[in-house]
Image (cartoon, rainbow, N blue to C red):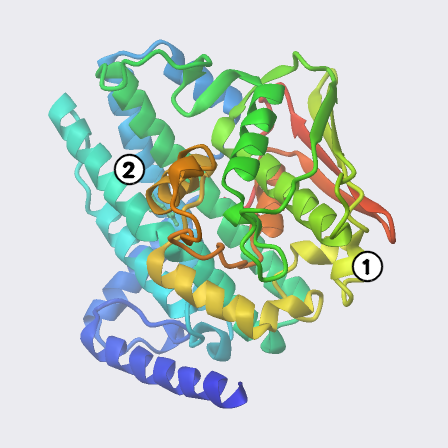
């Protein structure tokens, strides 16, 4: 293990030096020692952008702006994204440059730096958008970048897990939080603009099941999204790899929903479903593990509450609580940490291996993306009826990379919500999610 760490670090250092010779951009952890005029120029550009303030938005602003679209507003939206994203990326490049050298040379971190530097340069040099054709090209440009950056989270998570012996947990988690909040914010702006352009150009003319403006669903039905997640989790149970077994034949606990069943609010559906999916997955997995061999598993109770200012969700399971499966975790919020000091699983070989795989192939971040990926790989239960006896599913259970909970926490807090876990050790866990309903909170200040 130690050998592998040292070996990969040596490779990375060699890689960094190679890159430094080839690339014109400033190298990590070395900004004060610029040697070539080109590096000096590029760092000056970075400083210029990093010195600008980001212009955070609220959900409500994103909806209002997108509601009555015309060409002029569409170009305004494009040019806002074109000029705002390089500022936000510059802030994060600065953050990366400020990391200790031992951290920036870790596997994964340098890759993210390269991606961000390249995106920064592309945005900085992108000409203003003034026609519909230019906007179409700009949307294609954004889509390519969104795809290219699919590996950022596993790479960062891998790099920072490996670095956690060298950074105090508070620093490490604060850095990760800024990186991830900022990344969500950039993707929201890019995806929202693409969706607005599609709506304006009539490219997406199928009637959406729920009203939306860009990527924001203005009347998101909470119960319906929860049911969708439950359906996916139980129909395609390989998400729920339990104790090393593929979960095709395991019985699943029933999920009962009560409270304000008609609750609706304006939110980014992708974000809400990501959180609901991860939380339900954890509850199902721990319930199955805790009650092995029992014919009827205790159900999971989901309670929805539509408050005056927010939507609340409580998910209660009888999966034994955190002590059953997470021996080293003393405080539930340690599960949100990327540091091995707070969460020892960060340095487990299986986690690192799974992260390496995800870093290479990119992460299917949304529930819908994951579904279409699995649909290609494995038939659903319904489709499996005619499958030959003894035939194996085509793919193994999804490896656990351990970022579902920390990412859910980041998504929940991005627009000012909260996520808390309460463990009743020996019995079960209650998770409390609160998301603001009015859409008036600004994005996290760290964008
Ligand atoms: C990211 O996904 O990390 C981004 O920054 C995306 C953006 C370049 C469109």
- The reply to whether residue 284 is in sight is yes
Badges 2 and 1: C-beta atoms under 8 Å apart? no
* Residue carrying label 1: 323
Return the residue nearer the eye: 34 or 284. 284
Residue 399, given in percent of the width and then of the height, sits at 50, 59
* Residue carrying label 2: 82
Mark 2 Cβ inside 8 Å of ligand 1:
no
Badge 1 density bin: few <14, some 14–19, many ≥20, Cα 10 Å = some
| Residue at (81, 62) in percent of width and height | 330
| Residue at (26, 39) in percent of width and height | 143
| Residue at (21, 40) in percent of width and height | 141
| Residue at (47, 62) in percent of width and height | 156
Look at the picture and state if 334 lies above or below 33: above
Residue 202, given in percent of the width and then of the height, sits at 23, 14
Residue 217, given in percent of the width and then of the height, sits at 48, 19
Return the residue nearer the eye: 6 or 63. 6
Identify the image quadrant of residue 411. Answer: top right
Look at the picture and state if 140 lies above or below 323: above
Question: Disc 1 on helix, strand or loop?
Answer: helix
Identify the image quadrant of residue 357. Answer: bottom left
Residue 99, given in percent of the width and then of the height, sits at 50, 70
Rounded to the nearest angstrom, the CA distance separating label 2 from label 1 is 48 Å
> Does label 2 or label 1 sit earlier along the sequence?
2
Question: Disc 2 on helix, strand or loop?
Answer: helix
User: For the residues carrying marks 2 and 1, which lies nearer the camera in this image?
Assistant: 1
Q: Is residue 76 left or right of residue 313?
A: left
Badge 2 density bin: few <14, some 14–19, many ≥20, Cα 10 Å = many
Q: Is residue 152 left or right of residue 400?
A: left
Q: Which residue occupies the extreme bottom position in the image?
A: 3
Identify the image quadrant of residue 400. Answer: bottom right
Q: Is residue 445 left or right of residue 289?
A: left
């Amino acid at each position: 293990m130690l050998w592998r760490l040292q070996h990969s670090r040596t490779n990375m250092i060699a890689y960094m030096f190679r890159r430094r010779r080839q690339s014109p951009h400033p190298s990590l952890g070395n900004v004060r020692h610029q040697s070539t005029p080109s590096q000096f120029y590029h760092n000056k550009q970075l400083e210029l952008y990093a010195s600008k303030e980001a212009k955070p938005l609220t959900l409500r602003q994103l909806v209002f702006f997108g509601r009555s679209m015309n060409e002029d507003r569409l170009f305004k939206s494009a040019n806002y994204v074109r000029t705002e994203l390089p500022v936000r990326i510059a802030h994060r490049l600065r953050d990366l440059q400020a990391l200790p050298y031992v951290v920036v040379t870790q596997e994964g971190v340098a890759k993210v730096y390269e991606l961000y530097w390249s995106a920064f340069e592309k945005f900085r040099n992108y000409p203003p958008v003034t026609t519909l054709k230019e906007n179409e090209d700009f949307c294609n440009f954004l889509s390519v970048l969104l795809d290219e950056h699919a590996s950022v989270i596993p790479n960062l998570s891998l790099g920072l897990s490996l670095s956690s012996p060298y950074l105090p947990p508070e620093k490490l988690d604060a850095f990760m939080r800024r990186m991830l909040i900022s990344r969500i914010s950039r993707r929201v702006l890019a995806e929202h603009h693409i969706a607005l352009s599609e709506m304006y150009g009539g490219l997406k003319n199928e009637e959406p099941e729920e009203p939306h403006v860009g990527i924001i669903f203005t009347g998101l039905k909470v119960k319906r999204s929860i049911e969708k997640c439950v359906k996916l989790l139980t129909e395609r149970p390989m998400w729920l790899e339990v104790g090393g077994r593929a979960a095709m034949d395991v019985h699943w606990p029933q999920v009962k929903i009560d409270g304000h069943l008609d609750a609706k609010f304006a939110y980014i559906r992708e974000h809400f479903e990501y959180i609901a999916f991860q939380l339900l997955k954890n509850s199902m997995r721990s319930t199955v593990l805790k009650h092995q061999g029992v014919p009827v598993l205790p159900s999971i109770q989901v309670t929805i509450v539509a408050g005056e200012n927010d939507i609340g969700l409580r998910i209660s399971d009888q999966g034994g609580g955190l002590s059953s499966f997470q021996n080293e975790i003393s405080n539930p919020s340690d599960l949100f940490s990327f540091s091995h000091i707070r969460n020892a699983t960060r340095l487990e070989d299986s986690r690192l291996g799974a992260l390496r795989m995800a870093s290479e192939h990119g992460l299917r971040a949304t529930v819908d993306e994951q579904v279409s990926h699995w649909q290609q790989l494995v038939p659903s239960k319904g489709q499996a009826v005619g499958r030959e006896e003894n035939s194996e599913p085509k793919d193994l259970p999804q490896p656990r990379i351990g970022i579902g909970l920390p990412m859910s926490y980041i998504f929940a807090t991005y627009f000012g919500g909260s996520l808390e876990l309460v463990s009743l050790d020996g019995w079960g866990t209650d998770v409390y999610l609160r998301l603001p309903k009015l859409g008036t909170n600004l994005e996290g200040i760290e964008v």
